[in-house]
Amino acid sequence: MEKIINYMAESLLSINPTASVLEATHTMHDNKIHSLLVEESGEYIGIITNTDISKKVVSEDLDPEKIQVADVMNFPLTKLESQESMEKAAQVMRDHGTHHLVVTEHGQMLGILSITDYHNYLVKKHPR
């Protein structure tokens, strides 16, 4: 059984909910990532992803400089323990309609598992 901890990204970059979506976009681009945790008063309260920005800002022709992260972020966070299987991760993503899971260990956040990480797991599991 392959575990989530072996495929997750350990980067826990975050942004304030009052930051602009444009700032979030720049941060994601600069760090070559597709999501940011949203942090307020030292706690992670949500997540913003490229998909959120595309569907909720760009497709609605809204100004990313004027829209705050809090207006488009997803919450609450979908979490899964690091020792769970990759199959369980896929099931939870499917059940919650999300492409990103927060990975925890004994309640402490360790990283993020994305749909891309799951794809990489499948490629490794079923090489051509």
Image: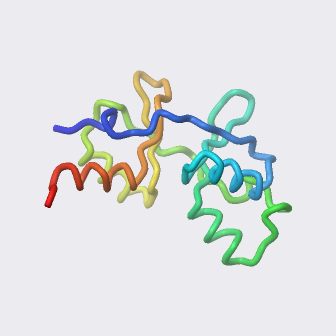
The image's colour scheme reads rainbow
Q: Residue furthest right?
A: 66
Number of numbered markers: 0
Nearer to me, 31 or 7: 31
- Residue 4 x %, y %: 32, 38
- Residue 53 x %, y %: 65, 64
**Residue name at image x 50 percent, y 29 percent:** 109
**Residue name at image x 17 percent, y 50 percent:** 125
Q: Residue 56 is drawn in which quadrant?
A: bottom right
Nearer to me, 101 or 21: 21
- The quarter of the image holding the N terminus is top left
Q: Residue 12 is drawn in which quadrant?
A: top right
- The quarter of the image holding the C terminus is bottom left
Nearer to me, 40 or 119: 119
**Residue name at image x 80 percent, y 54 percent:** 20
- Residue 56 horizontal side relative to residue 119, left or right: right
- Residue 39 x %, y %: 68, 37
Nearer to me, 6 or 98: 6
- Residue 82 horizontal side relative to residue 100, left or right: left
Q: Residue furthest top?
A: 106
The correct choice, above or below, for 121 with respect to 95 in the image is above
- Residue 106 x %, y %: 41, 21
**Residue name at image x 42 percent, y 56 percent:** 96
